[in-house]
Amino acid sequence: MAAGRDSRLPALTLLYFGIDLPNLQKYNDPVMTVQGIDNIGICTTDLTRSVAFYKRLGFTEAYRNDRGVMMAAGTVQLFLFQVRQPNPAPVGRELGLFGNPPGLDHISFAVSNVDALYAELCKAGVPFAGPPENQTWGARMVALKDPDGNNLYLLQRL
């Protein structure tokens, strides 16, 4: 054991989060673990406008029902649905990470050529915060907002 390191720390941390140590093995069971994200639900003020926007990003309509529209691109699924309350508050999130309140901040979509997609979307009138830029952590990225102000990033791994 390293000097000054408490060997009980992992156990205490697990107890803090409510994990029963004698039954820890069941948390390694593949049946009891998250396997991925099935879909991301996005509440919109105008469903038709949002469907058209996400189609411009390359999504297609997978299905539609009385609750909303499932959009798909590759393995990504977005469930778009319309708010049913009068005068909803606008989304109040800034592009960037650290000035926003707690909660889901953004969605980053993996793309194969961010510069080509950026150019195509600019021609279609999609507004961006600026052009794609290389990031120090190994990606080229551009930021934009959907019609309701949700933060989106188009991200190409370098």
Image: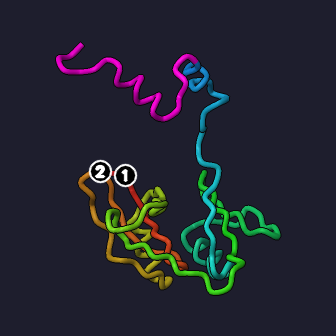
* Residue type beneath disc 2: Gly
Q: In the figure, 25 relative to 34: above or below?
A: above
Q: Which residues are magenta?
A: 1-22
Between 134 and 149, the one nearer to me in the picture: 149
SS state under label 1: strand
Mark 1 or mark 2: name the one nearer the start of the chain. Answer: 2
Return the residue at label 1. Answer: 157
Q: Quadrant of residue 49?
A: bottom right
The residue sitting at 45% across, 59% down in the picture is 108
Mark 1–mark 2 Cα distance, whole angstroms, equals 6 Å
Tell me: 10 left or right of 64.
left
Residue with the most extreme left position: 3
| Relative image position of residue 23 (x, y in whole percent) | 58, 19
The residue sitting at 45% across, 33% down in the picture is 16
SS state under label 2: loop
| Relative image position of residue 100 (x, y in whole percent) | 38, 67
Between 81 and 50, the one nearer to me in the picture: 81
The residue sitting at 32% across, 51% down in the picture is 158
Tell me: 38 left or right of 89.
right
Quarter of the picture containing the N terminus is: top left
Residue 7 is one of the magenta-drawn residues: yes
Residue 41 is one of the magenta-drawn residues: no
Q: In the figure, 141 relative to 82: above or below?
A: above
Residue with the most extreme top position: 1
Q: Which mark is residue 138?
A: 2
